Amino acid sequence: MKTAIAIGAHPDDIEFMMAGTLLLLKKQGFEIHYLNLSTGNLGTTEYDAESIKNIRLGEAKSAAAILGAHFHPPFCNDLEIFYDEKTLRRMAAIIREVKPTIVLTHSPVDYMEDHTNTSRLAVTASFARGMPNFHSIPERSADNYNCTVYHALPHGLKDPLRKTVTAGAFVNTTSVHQQKLEALKAHQSQQNWLDVSQKLNSYLQTMEDFSLKTGQMSQKFKYAEGWRRHLHYGFCGQDDDPLKVLGNDYVVSEEYERTLDQF
């Protein structure tokens, strides 16, 4: 069974930057998995922490169902996603259960630490998949196989110093854009919260704008998601690029590739 997992920090991160690619992989016969590390307990000005955790858990489950993905429950809280031993061991258990050949996760550099720490945890847990002396929580058997890690573009398509980040490859999400939008709509509790807390003009429009802008970057697609492939050492073959299974819906940026060996 071909398997892919999307690993985000908060409920709705996957829908913003990764869900279109996940949907297209499902169409190619992949079993797809959906994991947000955080409960989303701070994403509100209306509810207490326990109430919003329950609300957001239900929303995330609904979103995963819309995507047709296997749901994995969160095990951290907002602003408490740390790159520490216990969290890494719990992440490693999920990787060992799922055995993904494709891991989709956050940019290594993003506007907030929950995102960057999630990226680091996903990378290290994937790296440790075949190390039997690294014990996961709960204990799961190690298994060495090719696993390619892809990093999404950062939120806002910019790094923390406001510089636009260029993708190494683009996925055409036009055909699944409406389903991606429906999954984002499932996170109803967040629409007012993010409009207020992060000055977004519109929660749903923001995802639309990100997708359109990435499509423009591709110079080929209307709606797109952008990806940068992690260095292969310890993960897969040097030329492994399994998103190529998407055919004409996947294009590698020749300009990006040319910059890789520049000093």
Image: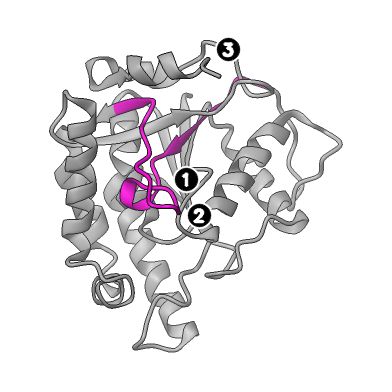
Question: Can you give x and y, in whole percent of width and height, for residue 19 in the image?
Answer: 32, 43
Give the residue type at disc 1: His
Q: First in sequence, mark 2 or 3: give its number.
A: 2
Question: Can you give x and y, in whole percent of width and height, for residue 97 in the image?
Answer: 62, 40
Q: Which residue is mark 2?
A: 115
Is 24 rendered above or below residue 253? below
Q: Which residue is mark 3?
A: 238
Predominant SS of the magenta segment: loop
Give the residue type at disc 2: His
Is 109 rendered above or below residue 39? above
C-alpha gap between disc 2 and disc 1: 6 Å
Secondary structure beneath label 3? loop
Packing grade of label 1 (10 A; few <14, some 14-19, many >=20) is many
Q: Nearer the viewer, residue 87 or 216?
A: 216
Q: First in sequence, mark 1 or 3: give its number.
A: 1
Q: Is residue 154 magenta?
A: yes
Packing grade of label 3 (10 A; few <14, some 14-19, many >=20) is few
Instruction: Point out the stretch of residues depicted in magenta.
Output: 145-170
Q: First in sequence, mark 2 or 1: give its number.
A: 1
Question: Can you give x and y, in whole percent of width and height, for residue 168 in the image?
Answer: 39, 25
Q: Which residue is mark 1?
A: 106
Residue located at (56% from left, 37% from top): 98
Give the residue type at disc 3: Gln
